Image (tube, coloured by chain):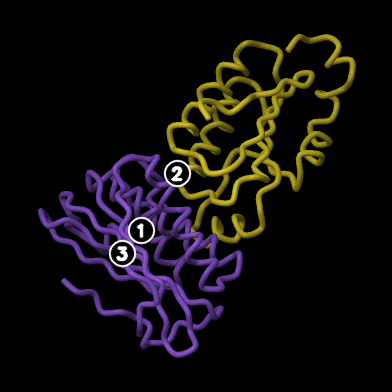
Chain colours: A yellow, B purple
Amino acid sequence: MDRIPILRLGSVLIVSVQGDLADALAVALRHDVGAAVSSGGITGVILDVSGVAIVDSYLGRVLTEIAADCSLLGASTVVAGIKPAVAITLVEMGFRLDGARTARSLEAAVAMLGADVAPTAILGSGP
Amino acid sequence: MSLSTAPAALPVRSDVDLIAVREAARTAAADAGFSLVNQTKLVTAVSELARNAVVHGGGGEVRIDSVQQGSLRGVRLVVTDQGPGIEDIAQALTDGHTTGHGLGLGLGGAKRLVNNDFTIESAPGQGTTVTIAMWATPGLTPIQARLPVRS
């Protein structure tokens, strides 16, 4: 896979991260999310990691960097669906997912960002 | 201690190689009967160590052994590089210590993830070898399971 797809729903970007990522792919995602947010009209970014079985300190750092980038660009980030085993592992390593909110699922993340993904917003914006 | 499988060495030269290492460690941990949490911890630990070998050691290799002691099944991983080595191992194991690229959680984090069943051999100019082991029985890390590292 060359790139992780970034979907736009209203003023929210949804990124479904799946499988085992090479470092370069994670870095490419960071650049792509930054570019997509800076293109305008984006207030929220959801990173769905429910399909990710391993988050080591490198990938964890990229996730926090994406959240920090988006914050500077005016969008808030929600990391959704962290697997319980991944959460336990990150805590034991001493890793802190600073700067990003978390949600139990993609659905909960969408609810958290609420009005930003309202149907009118979907109608009012292009892909 | 017996080896139930022939050691398999996987080269680690780039970030793409790390994926194969993680997959092989996952398979070995699952075969040894590890819980999902312990599989995840072991795979994450080896990912940290193998990345160190790539980033700091200029590449190296990871050997994965299925090991058994009595009724205990486990997995032992040896990560080796021929890089510049580590001058101050105690400092390298300290959380927050980084040479500039990461969070500094790699070595210390990996050690915690395998319940301190962790040995490191390194000296300036002589590369680095890190050996970790984890056992299928949760929370049980017998003294005998701490393996001597051959030099």
Which residue is under mark 2? A58
Which residue is under mark 1? B107
**Residue A44: image location, x then y, percent:** 71, 26
Q: Does dot 1 land on a helix, a strand or a loop?
A: helix
Decide: few, some or many residues near mark 1? Use Cα within 10 Å; few <14, some 14-19, many ≥20.
many
Is B59 situated above or below B151?
Answer: above
Q: CA distance from mark 2 to mark 3?
A: 20 Å
User: Which quarter of the rendering shows the N terminus of chain B?
Assistant: bottom left
Tell me the kind of residue under disc 3.
Val
Name the residue: 15% across, 50% down.
B84
Asked whether the residues under marks 1 and 3 belong to the same chain, the reply is yes
- Name the image quarter holding residue B78: bottom left
Which residue is under mark 3? B78
User: Which quarter of the rendering shows the C terminus of chain B?
Assistant: bottom left
Camera-nearest label, 1 or 3: 3
Chain letter behind tag 2: A
- Name the image quarter holding residue B39: bottom right
Tell me the kind of residue under disc 1.
Leu
| In front of the other: B104 or A28 | A28
Left or right of residue B151: residue A98: right
Chain letter behind tag 3: B
Tell me the kind of residue under disc 2.
Tyr
Circles 2 and 1 in contact, beta carbons < 8 Å: no
**Residue A50: image location, x then y, percent:** 68, 45
Q: Does dot 2 land on a helix, a strand or a loop?
A: helix
Decide: few, some or many residues near mark 2? Use Cα within 10 Å; few <14, some 14-19, many ≥20.
some
Camera-nearest label, 2 or 3: 3
